[in-house]
Image: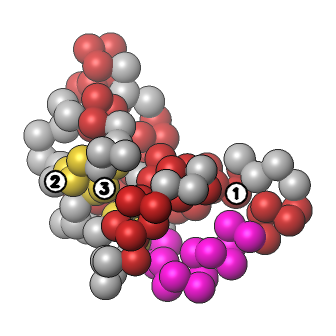
Protein backbone atom coordinates (compact mmCIF):
# COMPACT_ATOMS: atom_id res chain seq x y z
CA UNK A 1 0.00 0.00 0.00
CA UNK A 2 1.17 3.53 -0.74
CA UNK A 3 0.49 6.10 1.97
CA UNK A 4 -0.55 9.69 1.40
CA UNK A 5 1.20 12.44 3.35
CA UNK A 6 -1.78 12.88 5.65
CA UNK A 7 -1.33 9.41 7.15
CA UNK A 8 2.13 10.40 8.38
CA UNK A 9 0.69 13.60 9.82
CA UNK A 10 -1.88 11.56 11.76
CA UNK A 11 0.93 9.41 13.15
CA UNK A 12 2.96 12.48 14.13
CA UNK A 13 -0.11 13.77 15.98
CA UNK A 14 -0.24 10.55 17.99
CA UNK A 15 -3.13 8.82 16.22
CA UNK A 16 -2.72 5.18 17.24
CA UNK A 17 -5.19 3.98 14.59
CA UNK A 18 -2.95 5.40 11.85
CA UNK A 19 0.12 3.84 13.46
CA UNK A 20 -1.58 0.43 13.63
CA UNK A 21 -2.62 0.73 9.99
CA UNK A 22 0.98 1.29 8.92
CA UNK A 23 2.32 -1.43 11.23
CA UNK A 24 -0.19 -3.91 9.77
CA UNK A 25 0.99 -3.45 6.18
CA UNK A 26 3.70 -5.76 4.89
CA UNK A 27 4.55 -3.50 1.95
CA UNK A 28 4.96 0.14 2.97
CA UNK A 29 5.31 2.54 0.07
CA UNK A 30 5.34 6.27 -0.44
CA UNK A 31 5.84 8.47 -3.44
CA UNK A 32 8.89 10.67 -3.70
CA UNK A 33 6.38 13.57 -3.59
CA UNK A 34 5.23 12.48 -0.12
CA UNK A 35 8.85 12.02 0.95
CA UNK A 36 9.66 15.58 -0.10
CA UNK A 37 6.53 16.97 1.58
CA UNK A 38 7.45 15.26 4.85
CA UNK A 39 11.01 16.59 4.79
CA UNK A 40 9.88 20.05 3.73
CA UNK A 41 7.45 20.28 6.65
CA UNK A 42 10.14 19.51 9.24
CA UNK A 43 10.58 22.43 11.62
CA UNK A 44 14.25 21.74 12.31
CA UNK A 45 17.13 19.30 11.72
CA UNK A 46 15.98 17.04 14.58
CA UNK A 47 12.52 16.58 13.06
CA UNK A 48 14.08 16.14 9.62
CA UNK A 49 16.32 13.35 10.93
CA UNK A 50 13.43 11.79 12.87
CA UNK A 51 11.32 11.60 9.70
CA UNK A 52 14.10 9.89 7.78
CA UNK A 53 14.72 7.45 10.66
CA UNK A 54 11.01 6.64 10.96
CA UNK A 55 10.75 5.82 7.25
CA UNK A 56 13.93 3.72 7.34
CA UNK A 57 13.05 1.88 10.58
CA UNK A 58 9.59 0.94 9.29
CA UNK A 59 10.96 -0.21 5.94
CA UNK A 60 9.25 2.29 3.69
CA UNK A 61 10.18 2.17 0.03
CA UNK A 62 10.18 5.52 -1.77
CA UNK A 63 8.81 5.15 -5.29
CA UNK A 64 10.55 7.48 -7.75
CA UNK A 65 9.03 9.63 -10.44
CA UNK A 66 9.06 8.31 -13.97
CA UNK A 67 8.05 9.66 -17.35
CA UNK A 68 4.77 7.72 -17.16
CA UNK A 69 4.00 9.07 -13.69
CA UNK A 70 4.68 12.61 -14.86
CA UNK A 71 2.48 12.17 -17.90
CA UNK A 72 -0.37 10.63 -15.90
CA UNK A 73 -0.14 13.37 -13.25
CA UNK A 74 -0.36 16.03 -15.96
CA UNK A 75 -3.45 14.34 -17.39
CA UNK A 76 -5.02 14.27 -13.90
CA UNK A 77 -4.35 17.99 -13.46
CA UNK A 78 -5.82 18.74 -16.89
CA UNK A 79 -8.93 16.73 -16.06
CA UNK A 80 -9.51 17.57 -12.40
CA UNK A 81 -7.78 20.82 -11.39
CA UNK A 82 -10.63 23.09 -12.41
CA UNK A 83 -13.53 20.79 -11.60
CA UNK A 84 -12.25 19.32 -8.31
CA UNK A 85 -9.29 21.48 -7.26
CA UNK A 86 -6.71 18.72 -7.73
CA UNK A 87 -3.23 20.07 -6.95
CA UNK A 88 0.02 19.01 -8.59
CA UNK A 89 1.36 17.24 -5.48
CA UNK A 90 -1.76 15.12 -5.09
CA UNK A 91 -1.73 14.38 -8.83
CA UNK A 92 1.83 13.06 -8.53
CA UNK A 93 0.93 10.89 -5.52
CA UNK A 94 -2.14 9.50 -7.31
CA UNK A 95 -0.20 8.88 -10.51
CA UNK A 96 2.53 7.07 -8.57
CA UNK A 97 -0.07 4.75 -7.02
CA UNK A 98 -1.87 4.16 -10.33
CA UNK A 99 1.32 3.53 -12.32
CA UNK A 100 2.55 1.04 -9.71
CA UNK A 101 -0.90 -0.59 -9.47
CA UNK A 102 -1.09 -0.20 -5.70
CA UNK A 103 -3.80 1.09 -3.39
CA UNK A 104 -3.46 4.63 -2.05
CA UNK A 105 -4.28 5.05 1.62
CA UNK A 106 -5.53 8.53 2.49
CA UNK A 107 -7.96 10.37 4.74
CA UNK A 108 -8.33 13.10 2.10
CA UNK A 109 -10.92 11.35 -0.03
CA UNK A 110 -12.07 14.55 -1.73
CA UNK A 111 -8.59 15.03 -3.19
CA UNK A 112 -8.63 11.67 -4.95
CA UNK A 113 -12.28 10.71 -5.40
CA UNK A 114 -12.64 11.91 -9.01
CA UNK A 115 -9.72 9.81 -10.27
CA UNK A 116 -11.42 6.71 -11.61
CA UNK A 117 -8.38 4.51 -12.32
CA UNK A 118 -7.10 4.87 -8.76
CA UNK A 119 -7.61 2.30 -6.02
CA UNK A 120 -8.19 4.13 -2.73
CA UNK A 121 -8.34 2.94 0.87
CA UNK A 122 -10.03 5.63 2.95
CA UNK A 123 -8.57 6.06 6.42
CA UNK A 124 -11.01 7.40 9.01
CA UNK A 125 -9.16 8.75 12.02
Tell me how far mark 2 sits from mark 1, CA to CA: 26 Å
84 vs 22, nearest the viewer: 22
Q: Position of residue 70 (x, y in %)?
A: 39, 50
Query: Which tag is nearer the camera, tag 1 or tag 3?
Result: 3
Tell me how far mark 2 sits from mark 3, CA to CA: 9 Å
Q: Is residue 75 left or right of residue 61?
A: left
| For the residues bearing labels 1 and 3, Cβ distance under 8 angstroms | no
Tell me how far mark 1 sits from mark 3, CA to CA: 19 Å
Task: Give the position of the N terminus as an image quadrant.
Answer: bottom left
**Pointer 2: what residue?**
119
Q: Is residue 60 above or below residue 103?
A: below
Helix, strand or loop for disc 1? helix
| For the residues bearing labels 2 and 1, Cβ distance under 8 angstroms | no
**Pointer 3: what residue?**
105
Q: Is residue 62 magenta?
A: yes
Instruction: Give the class, few, some or many, for how many residues have Cα within 10 Å of label 3's Cα (few <14, many ≥20).
Output: many
**Pointer 1: what residue?**
39
Helix, strand or loop for disc 3? strand
Q: Position of residue 37 (x, y in %)?
A: 61, 50
86 vs 77, nearest the viewer: 86
Q: Position of residue 84 (x, y in %)?
A: 29, 19
Residue in the image at 78% along x and 63% along y: 48
Query: Which tag is nearer the camera, tag 2 or tag 3?
Result: 3
Helix, strand or loop for disc 2? loop
Residue range highlighted in magenta: 50-63
Q: Residue furthest right?
A: 45
Residue in the image at 30% along x and 45% along y: 124
35 vs 10, nearest the viewer: 10
Residue 54 seen in render: yes
Amino acid sequence: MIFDTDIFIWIQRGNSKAARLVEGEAERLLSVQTYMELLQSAADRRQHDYTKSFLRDFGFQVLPLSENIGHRAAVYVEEYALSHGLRAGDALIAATAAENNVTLCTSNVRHFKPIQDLKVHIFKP
